Amino acid sequence: MPDVGEGLTEAEILKWYVQPGDTVTDGQVVCEVETAKAAVELPIPFDGTVHELCFPEGTTVDVGQVIISVNVGGGAPPAPAAPVTESVAAQAVPEEPVAEEGEPQGRQPVLVGYGVAASSTKRRPRKAAGDAAPAAPAPQAPVVVSVPEQLNGHAAGAGRPLAKPPVRKLAKDLGVDLATVVPTGPDGIITREDVHAAAAPAPAPAVETPAPAPAPAAAPAAAPAAETSGARETRVPIKGVRKATAAAMVGSAFTAPHVTEFVTFDITRTMKLVEELKSDKDMAGLRVNPLLLIAKAILVAIRRNPEINAAWDEAAQEIVLKHYVNLGIAAATPRGLIVPNIKDAHAQTLPELSKSLSELVATAREGKTTPAAMQGGTFTITNVGVFGVDTGTPILNPGESAILAVGAIKLQPWVHKGKVKPRQVTTLALSFDHRLVDGELGSKFLADVAAILEQPKRLITWA
């Protein structure tokens, strides 16, 4: 089981796509696993025949444990075993290879996992207790694989550049040939910053945290009930995204001193602007809704109050001011709450921001959000208003200094131009880390957002 994220220690096997006896080819997806950050499909890095599935579906496996063994020799493959069941979950790992005389010991180093043993090594066959010695030499045992880092199907070595899966994905998205990138990471590993440097002459704003591997085409359903106590209770195991979210929220709540401020205001003009933009030729084919203009107002307010876009570095005892905005949007999915973010949202025009928001929401609903899309956020929006809730006191996304909750937009009696009239009204709630953001800065920022949305023409003058 590879570490498909940064520092993850375990993953749950959601589905096997192969069974013992099946033939597999280099790059073929053999299983789907769920980590604390995303569901990920794991390809096999070579050709061969599946010998054994070491764990059944639904098992949580520690990183580094062997999950599948494959016969890659030229001889006859081993007889197919029965489909994996719960009884094989704790089977032992075959013994380590014994190198030929004069060969280097150990395995070829790879980025994650234990790698693949050199083809010239031999393995001692395992014998059950009490078995007599074989009359003839035992056939070569299948290669046992802890699926390595090269999740795109390429094995290490042979002159291939070393890079983690999210870095390969980034290079592909930016059209960068990894063979042309100068690595700066340890042991010649290409980093995200190396790819950004190769993609543009000017340094691009770097995402602070490296990203893990790509997510799969579809998200799994919510975790099944593990134990039912009669008909009155159901117990659901805490794992995957929900487990990670719970840990992150507890850590955030008890690490960063939270302060929440509220503002209720008339958003009628913004709602009218939404309707006007829907017929604007520049926004043709794009989704226009209140969240789009709220996001734009936040970006304008961040530029006017840049200290709100920061992070607290406890180890270095420094405040890290971010000169870019990776705008997170909290999204409820069957797997739990996730917060993908729009990279460099501060540099996007309104049509570009609309497209990015639409893609982010659609991807989250389809369960295709990649772990990379959830890394490096600097400011988050959570839209509790879609559930009819007036507002809330949101908890900070770890590593960020502020989060804004958007409440429901409702028609209410409001004093407008000296008279009580029905107006569209909403409430915003800003939670912030009081180590970074004092009351004055938090109040100025929240008032700025409300002022822009009360008079959305300021989006033009202030943008």
Image (cartoon, rainbow, N blue to C red):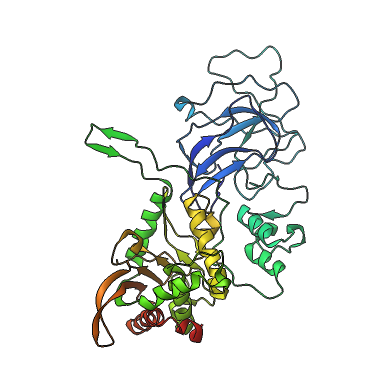
**Residue farthest toward the front in the current orientation of the protein:** 279
Q: Is residue 71 above or below residue 116?
A: above
Q: In which quadrant of the rendered view does residue 100 lie?
A: top right
Q: Is residue 344 visible?
A: no
Q: Is residue 273 above or below residue 91?
A: below
Q: Nearer the viewer, residue 419 or 380?
A: 419
How far across and how far down the image is residue 133, in percent? Answer: 63, 14
Q: In which quadrant of the rendered view does residue 121 lie?
A: top right
Q: In which quadrant of the rendered view does residue 48 lie?
A: top right
Horizontal side of residue 430 vs 122, given as left or right:
left
How far across and how far down the image is residue 345, in percent? Answer: 54, 71
Q: Nearer the viewer, residue 223 or 11?
A: 223
Name the quadrant of the N terminus. top right
Q: Nearer the viewer, residue 78 or 420?
A: 420
Residue at screen point 58% across, 27% down: 19
Horizontal side of residue 20 vs 14, given as left or right:
right
Q: Nearer the viewer, residue 156 or 195?
A: 195
How many discs appear?
Answer: 0
How far across and how far down the image is residue 98, in percent? Answer: 68, 32
Residue at screen point 52% across, 67% down: 354
How far across and how far down the image is residue 42, in percent? Answer: 59, 42
Residue at screen point 49% across, 31% down: 56
Q: Is residue 119 visible?
A: yes
Residue at screen point 71% across, 17% down: 137
Horizontal side of residue 292 vs 142, given as left or right:
left
